[in-house]
Amino acid sequence: MVDIQPMYAIRYPIFEQTGLVSPPYDVLALQDKQSMLARNANNIVAVDLPHVPPKVAGPLQAYAHAASQLQAWLDSGVLVRDDVAALFPYEQTYTHEGRMYHRRGLFGRVRLEEFGGTGTIHPHEQTFSGPKEDRLLLTRATRCNISPVFGLYDDPHNAVTESLFAKLDDPIAEALLPSMDGQSRVKSTLWRVASAHSIRHMQKLLADKHLYIADGHHRYGTSLNYRRERVASNGTLPHDHPANFVMFVLVAMQDPGLIIMPTHRTVSNLKGFTLDKFMAAAGSRLKLATGEKFHGDQLPALEKRLPSFGAHAMAVYDPAADKAVVVMPTTDDPLREFLSAPTVADHSAAWRSLDVAILQELVFDQIVKPHFAAGGDVSWAFPHEAQEVLRLCHHAQHHAGFILQPTPLKAVRDLCNHNELMPQKSTFFYPKLATGMLINPLF
């Protein structure tokens, strides 16, 4: 049973927050942080990104400084803490491929659950120790959730969202952040619902849902670790202690504004890679979906066409020749022959049908690495658009690009329900949530 509770939120008390909020910490570089702070010294990035890169733990003084900054803002009124608990409807308005979308969701606190068994909160990707160490140090220092976990739930008729947004007062905050391609902006709008009756109604509508973590696995894992520390320190925690909860944004899977984008790959440290040699190395495991070869400037259009070639069709790009081909496995279950491999053995047929799994286990591990890896290993990046594949291949000197179809949302839900994790970088839910519109205190 999902237990969602209102928050005594910490927030900026002004409506226009464009200069104060930021994208999530894990998509930012040091230059991004410096640029945002140069425009506004009160930007949340000063607290949420104390150490760069956040893939590993930084020095303790960095997190202590973040906590001091947060307290200074509270003392001076830059931030305020609400004295009334509330849920917060949240909408993101954005344009993608010439069409405007409105993704609607809800900020609130969700009671933590351990993963697995009969629980109702499910991860879909594995986590790593380094990022969780960084987030745990920040959580210890600030005693807050600075940025939310992004959660999805199944609601075929959008009953929760329609009820939530049916009658709202004026919004309390608005902010604009750059879109993924930098060509437009994503508008975030926030409302507050403090009525006890409305909160109970939302709690009732959400109680029987399962939550699927779309983004923020490390933040959720950090909250579990923080709670374990508090239990170990105190012996026990009261049922409604703030450390038993974590801040979520909840969005229905059927929301018209929810889109899932692919995560492509570009690969470096290859030697002698060409499309002809790649197909020869693939042997009978892959076939051409079409005899046509595509120029690099055709990749954005080809990205959209991939589903028309069939299941598991993917484009392989050779930047040296500026050509791409579309390939697909020759069998319906191409990973079945690797069932004895440790990375495949414990997985279901549904997992084996994921394009990202086929790419990793078949294309990379059986074809690319054995035949083209200089020094025995490769490194890769994870762009989300064909244009970014081109840029990495030509300007960052990556030697090959692989363009995938998006992972179906149904696959995320079904694998989560079976407690099965997807390979790293399987999904990209666009746009990212804004950080800084709300902070959830754990004290």
Image (cartoon, helix red, strand yellow):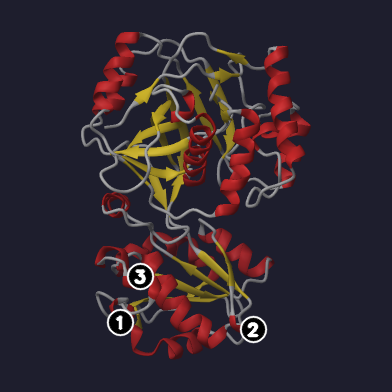
Q: Which mark is residue 337?
A: 1
Measure how far apart labels 2 and 3 are at the Cα level: 29 Å
Q: Are marks 2 and 3 in contact (CB under 8 Å)?
A: no
> Which kind of residue does numbered mark 2 sit on?
Gly
Q: Depth check: give the residue in front, 260 or 218.
A: 218
Measure how far apart labels 2 and 1 are at the Cα level: 27 Å
Q: In which quadrant is the N terminus drawn? A: top left
Q: Residue 375 carries which label?
A: 2
**Residue 351 image position (x, y, % from top left):** 31, 64
Query: Which mark is in front, 3 or 1?
Result: 1
**Residue 267 image position (x, y, % from top left):** 57, 71
Please rate how many residues cluster around mark 3, counting C-alpha atoms within 10 Å: few if below 14, some from 14 to 19, many from 20. many
Measure how far apart labels 3 and 1 are at the Cα level: 19 Å
Q: Which mark is residue 313?
A: 3
Residue 211: name its quadrant: top left
Name the outermost residue toward the front.
235
Q: Which of marks 2 and 1 is nearer the N terminus?
A: 1
> Which kind of residue does numbered mark 3 sit on?
Ala
**Residue 140 image position (x, y, % from top left):** 62, 34
Q: Depth check: give the residue in front, 288 or 78.
A: 78
> Which kind of residue does numbered mark 1 sit on?
Glu
**Left or right, residue 184 beside residue 341:** right
**Left or right, residue 178 beside residue 402:** right
**Left or right, residue 408 beside residue 142:** left
Q: Is mark 2 on a helix, strand or loop?
A: helix
Instruction: Please tell me whether residue 157 is drawn above or below residue 398 in the rendered image.
Output: above
Q: Which residue is drawn at 54% across and 58% down?
A: 383
Q: Do the residues labelled 2 and 1 touch (CB within 8 Å)?
A: no
